[in-house]
């Protein structure tokens, strides 16, 4: 080792320089220039390593940045196909739901559900929607007609029943509903017209089961000059109730139970009659109006009707059934207090005027009949 001050060689183990007395310092045995060169090399190496580490760090950051950045999954074909299929399925589901909720069957089911709650007014709105959706199907029409009948909207109910019958002349439900409607309204003329066109035995049975045959009148209404003895008949043997004041005999308190013929006298009388079945149902109410005006009776017929006679002669007067004839011989006008004719009587001798009046069974009086008799006995 050399002394750092004088450069002299220091013995191994000595702690100072024997030449100059300088404390010994360990000095590497190499050229300082060589040491600086090495240091520079090391520094360059360190710089390169630092640059490499920096570059690696930046590359790592770029990779991390790439990994942290969301991937563009739309570029994945499978993902795109899945998305499209999902959208299609959702669209189909929405369309299917909308189509179902606006379908004929859906509207009918909604109406039926409301019918169970007795919400008939709301129910018919759905039945009408169903009819608009498919006008060829009959179910919604019949259900709507039934509800309109319950709601007493008879015109709408009748129109739908008739429409179904026009489309299907053998539809029992439509006929049954229409029979009920006409019976409710007491519209027996329409009921009879409906029955007149029926040939289907099952439908005719509906009429037999639901319709009581109306009573028959022995005389139709009209104008009469004499009393009418009216007879009523039920071909099924049902009870007959009638009224003579124009009221409905099927209504409680109005009808008179028919037991014997009804005598109609002068005036205008309306007879309404109805048959009542064992189940309490009534038939069509039949009405007839009778206008009875009594005419004045004709004058009495006398035989002989006057003349000159020389032999005893009997006088005969023709008296209609139920009538009476009153007469006088002195030319005065007879009255009901005058002599009543009871049979042929002898002509009075001399010149006399026979005056007669006829009073019929209704109390109507004829004009006075006068006959002049000259009887001169031989």
Image (cartoon, rainbow, N blue to C red):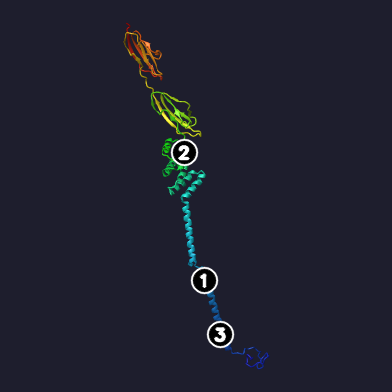
Local secondary structure at mark 3: helix
Quadrant holding the C terminus: top left
Mark drawn on residue 223: none
| Residue named by callout 1 | 66
| Residue named by callout 2 | 205
Mark drawn on residue 41: 3
- Asked if residue 243 is positioned above or below residue 44 in the image, the reply reads above
279 to the left or right of 291: right
Foreground label between 1 and 3: 1
Identified at 54% across, 79% down, the residue is 52
Identified at 47% across, 57% down, the residue is 92
- Asked if residue 62 is positioned above or below residue 326 in the image, the reply reads below
Q: Earlier in the sequence, mark 2 or mark 3?
A: 3
Q: CA distance from mark 1 to mark 3?
A: 37 Å
Q: Position of residue 5 (x, y in %)?
A: 63, 91
Identified at 37% across, 15% down, the residue is 317
356 to the left or right of 113: left
Q: Earlier in the sequence, mark 1 or mark 3?
A: 3
């Amino acid at each position: 080792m050399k002394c750092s001050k004088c450069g002299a060689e220091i013995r191994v183990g000595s702690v100072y320089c024997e030449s100059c007395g300088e404390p010994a310092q360990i000095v590497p045995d190499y050229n300082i220039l060589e040491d600086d060169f090495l240091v520079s090399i090391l520094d360059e190496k360190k710089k390169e390593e630092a640059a490499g580490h920096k570059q690696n760090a930046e590359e790592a950051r770029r990779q991390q940045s790439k990994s942290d950045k969301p991937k563009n999954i739309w570029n994945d074909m499978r993902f795109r196909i899945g998305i499209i299929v999902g959208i299609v399925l959702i669209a189909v589901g929405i369309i299917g739901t909308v189509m179902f909720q606006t379908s004929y069957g859906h509207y009918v089911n909604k109406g039926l559900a409301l019918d169970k709650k007795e919400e008939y007014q709301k129910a018919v709105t759905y039945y009408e929607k169903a009819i608009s959706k498919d006008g060829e199907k009959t179910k919604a029409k019949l259900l709507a007609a039934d509800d309109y009948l319950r709601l007493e909207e008879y015109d709408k109910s009748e129109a739908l029943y008739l429409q179904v019958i026009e489309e299907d002349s053998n539809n029992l439900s439509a006929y049954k509903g229409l029979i009920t409607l006409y019976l409710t309204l007491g519209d027996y003329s329409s009921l009879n017209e409906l029955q007149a066109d029926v040939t289907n035995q099952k439908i005719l049975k509906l009429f037999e089961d639901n319709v009581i045959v109306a009573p028959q009148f022995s005389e139709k209404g009209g104008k009469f000059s004499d009393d009418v003895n009216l007879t009523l008949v039920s071909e099924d043997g049902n009870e007959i109730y009638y009224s003579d004041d124009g009221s409905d005999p099927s209504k409680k308190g109005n009808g008179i139970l028919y037991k014997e013929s009804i005598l109609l006298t002068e005036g205008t009388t309306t007879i309404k009659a109805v048959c009542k079945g064992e189940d309490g149902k009534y038939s069509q109410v039949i009405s007839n109006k009778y206008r009875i005006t009594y005419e004045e009776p004709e004058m009495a017929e006398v035989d002989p009707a006057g003349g000159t006679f020389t032999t005893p002669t009997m006088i005969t007067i023709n008296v209609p059934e139920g009538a009476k004839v009153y007469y006088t011989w002195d030319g005065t006008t007879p009255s009901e207090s005058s002599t009543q004719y009871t049979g042929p009587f002898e002509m009075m001798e001399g010149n006399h005027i026979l005056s007669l009046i006829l009073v019929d069974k209704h109390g109507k009086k004829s004009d006075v009949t006068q006959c002049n008799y000259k009887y001169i006995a031989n």
